[in-house]
Amino acid sequence: MVFSINNMFSKNKKSGDIAKDRLKILLISDRTNCSPEIIQMIKKDIMYVVSKYIDIDKDKCIIDIEKSKKPYIFANIPIKEVKYK
Amino acid sequence: MSEVMVVTSGKGGVGKTTMSANLGAALARQKKKVVVVDTDIGLRNLDVVMGLENQIVYNLVDIIEGTCRVRQALIKDPRFDDLYLIPSAQTRDKSAVTPEQMRMLTDELRMEYDYIILDCPAGIEQGFRNAIAGADRALVVTTPEVSAIRDADRIVGLLEKECIKPVNLIINRIRPELVETGDMMSVEDVMDILGVDIIGAVPDDVEIVIATNKGIPLDENSIPGQAIKNISLRIQGEEIPMMNFSKDKGFFKKIFKMSNKRAQGDFNGI
């Protein structure tokens, strides 16, 4: 159930899917008592902290709040390959 | 064994009252002894949906205040052997009743009825607290709209906190043609997002408008009537596959599974 805010309102999306995406974000912020803005800030901070120590691929990071029974933070942060000489 | 069910939603106007009335009728058709209680004090509506508005003498608040006995306030639906209504009070407000008093009333009703259906007011304030006080289980009605589902999620959380189990979802006012074109969330979408067991889905249908206008129960052979009958059977623990309302190529060609249970057969087999 990973979703990204970026592709939420793309033009050719059906309104049913737009409703679904809006709802997912709403429910996550309701359930965690935490606004979408704060979720964005958490993402940024996590990326910042990790990148202090290792070189990560910031464009391919997926950090989201997901839910199964209870909500949890899911992070998939690809590490850039280190090329040895 | 009797069961007290609260029909609730959070958001108003999603069809709680219509659902309560027709679920009561569906259960009564199956020879169950049923009483539906309008707990929306100050905004009495269930009597009108059931067409019993001219027969009210006493109401819920009268029972609770001891002005009358339970028996005196009960209105029998003449169309069924064992369907009764306890109407709400129109000129009082929610503070006239406490959760403890509601629990006492439902316990008294348990002695005589198989199913006690409580039609809950919208909102999460005292009226809601009163309605859920005596309930064993909850049916949360929602429509496939963002606002209604969000409220349903909130209600589910509150019901879980009160240890009411099971909590089942009814998705009302589905418009199959819009689901098909992608302009309405489907039953599966809602189930996926909310993570609550769905006990039934009811299509938006002109039959409901007509029945409500007339103050009569839905014809059990109409599509929404069938859908509500299925819910009433699932309430009794039967495993009935979900109806598919899609209108293309024969009305009930495709029946989809509610869970991973067997789900073969045609409409007549449901």
Image (spheres, rainbow, N blue to C red):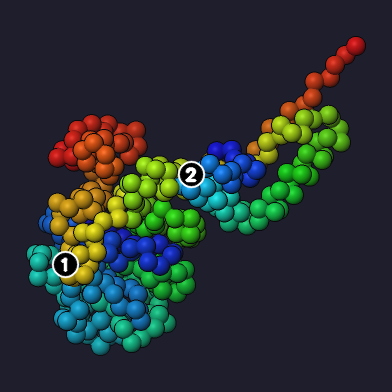
Q: Which residue occupies 68% across, 32% down? A: A76
Q: Is residue B210 visible?
A: yes
In the rendered image, the residue lying farthest to the front is: A11
Q: x, y percentage for residue B224?
A: 23, 53
Judge by depth and name the residue closer to the eye, B199 or A43: A43
**Three-letter amino acid code at the position of disc 1:** Ile
Residue B173, quarter of picture: bottom left
Residue occupied by mark 1: B216
Q: Is B191 drawn above or below residue B40 in the view shown?
A: above
In the picture provided, is B11 more to the left or to the right than B15? right
Q: Residues within 10 Å of mark 1 (few under 14, many from 20)?
A: some
Judge by depth and name the residue closer to the eye, B99 or B208: B208
Residue occupied by mark 2: A14
**Which quadrant is the N terminus of chain A positioned in?**
top right
In the rendering, which numbered label is found on residue B71?
A: none
Q: x, y percentage for residue B195?
A: 46, 45
Q: Is B166 drawn above or below residue A67 in the view shown?
A: below
